[in-house]
Image (cartoon, grey):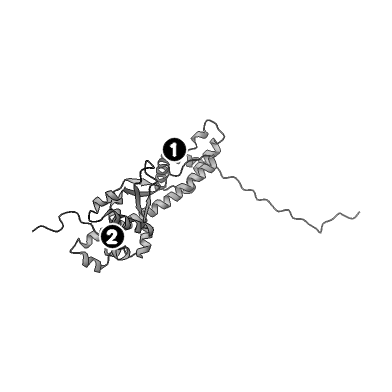
């Protein structure tokens, strides 16, 4: 007698199916699995691209129309974010997808963080509670990862805007090499204030120097060795002495002496 599960099954969480609909839950779970393996990183997010024809290879029991309805339903709920901006050619209409895990969490009211005992009992004979727990954990990790990416992008944006304003430059925030440099320094424990100190000290030294002003760039300022050296330079510069201006006190009782 052949086993029923003689190929990789499509898994679906009952919580998702109840909240979103069965078709939407299946599509969302499959997209999440694909995103975990996707190398496509743009604008701080992980993406996966597919046409409806290609999706049908993964869902052979559905028509393309059924698949498109499920995706569009999730897009309208803003759980799935789609874009065609990353296609190499404008004539290419392939959709790129990512999951907004914050929106998903809000819709599910955080019921997906841990599977309940009832869900585990119902799914135990089908694919095991441990598998469901792993899926829930992966959703949670991915959501935390996206939150961290958003935070880092805000920090990077602030640093680049500060550099552009001080050095009269127009460096792009979404430059991958620049983001890697800043993220690496942040992981080493440096703060936004440290970046500003480095920018300030080198701008004061190089901005009016024709030979050196071209080095007011992320690749020079934020490289591992240079950044530490420049930061130490900034720390060695004594802070200007603040002079307290005493207010003038007028004595209206004083007048000219009588002759």
Residue found at the very far top of the displayed protein: 211
Pointer 1 residue: 219
In front: 50, or 231? 50
The Cα atoms of the two marked residues, 1 and 2, are separated by 48 Å
Q: Position of residue 9 (x, y in %)?
A: 20, 56
In front: 49, or 205? 49
Q: Position of residue 117 (x, y in %)?
A: 25, 68
**Eye-nearest disc, 1 or 2:** 2
The residue located at (35%, 52%) in the rendering is 98
Residue 235 in sight from this viewpoint: no
Q: How many marks?
A: 2
Residue at disc 1, secondary structure: helix
* Mark 2 crowdedness (10 Å alpha carbons): few <14, some 14-19, many ≥20: some
Q: Position of residue 155 (x, y in %)?
A: 45, 49
Pointer 2 residue: 23
- In the rendered image, the vertical position of residue 206 relative to residue 67, given as above or below: above
The residue located at (44%, 40%) in the rendering is 222
Residue 134 in sight from this viewpoint: yes
* Drawn side of residue 127 relative to residue 152, left or right: left
In front: 157, or 220? 157
Q: Position of residue 157 (x, y in %)?
A: 47, 47
Residue at disc 2, secondary structure: helix
């Amino acid at each position: 007698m052949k086993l029923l599960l003689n190929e990789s099954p499509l898994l679906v969480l009952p919580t998702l199916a109840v909240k979103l609909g069965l078709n939407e839950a299946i599509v969302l779970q499959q997209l999440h699995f694909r995103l975990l393996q996707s190398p496509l990183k743009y604008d701080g997010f992980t993406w996966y691209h597919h046409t409806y024809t290609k999706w049908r290879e993964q869902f052979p029991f559905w028509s393309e129309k059924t698949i498109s309805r499920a995706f569009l339903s999730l897009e309208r709920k803003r759980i799935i974010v789609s874009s065609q901006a990353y296609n190499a050619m404008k004539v290419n209409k392939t959709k790129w997808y990512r999951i907004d895990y914050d929106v998903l969490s809000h819709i599910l009211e955080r019921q997906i963080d841990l599977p309940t005992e009832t869900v585990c009992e119902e799914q135990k004979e089908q694919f095991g509670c441990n598998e469901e727990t792993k899926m829930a954990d992966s959703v949670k990790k991915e959501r935390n990862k996206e939150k961290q990416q958003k935070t880092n992008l805000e920090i990077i944006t602030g640093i680049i805007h500060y550099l552009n304003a001080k050095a009269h430059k127009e460096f792009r925030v979404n430059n991958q090499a620049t983001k890697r440099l800043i993220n690496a320094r942040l992981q080493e424990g440096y703060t936004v204030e440290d970046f500003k100190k480095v920018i300030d000290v080198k701008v004061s030294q190089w901005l009016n120097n024709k030979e050196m002003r071209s080095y007011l760039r992320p690749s020079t300022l934020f490289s591992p060795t240079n950044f530490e050296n420049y930061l130490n330079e900034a720390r060695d510069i004594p802070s200007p002495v603040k002079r307290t201006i005493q207010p003038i006190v007028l004595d209206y009782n004083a007048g000219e002496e009588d002759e």
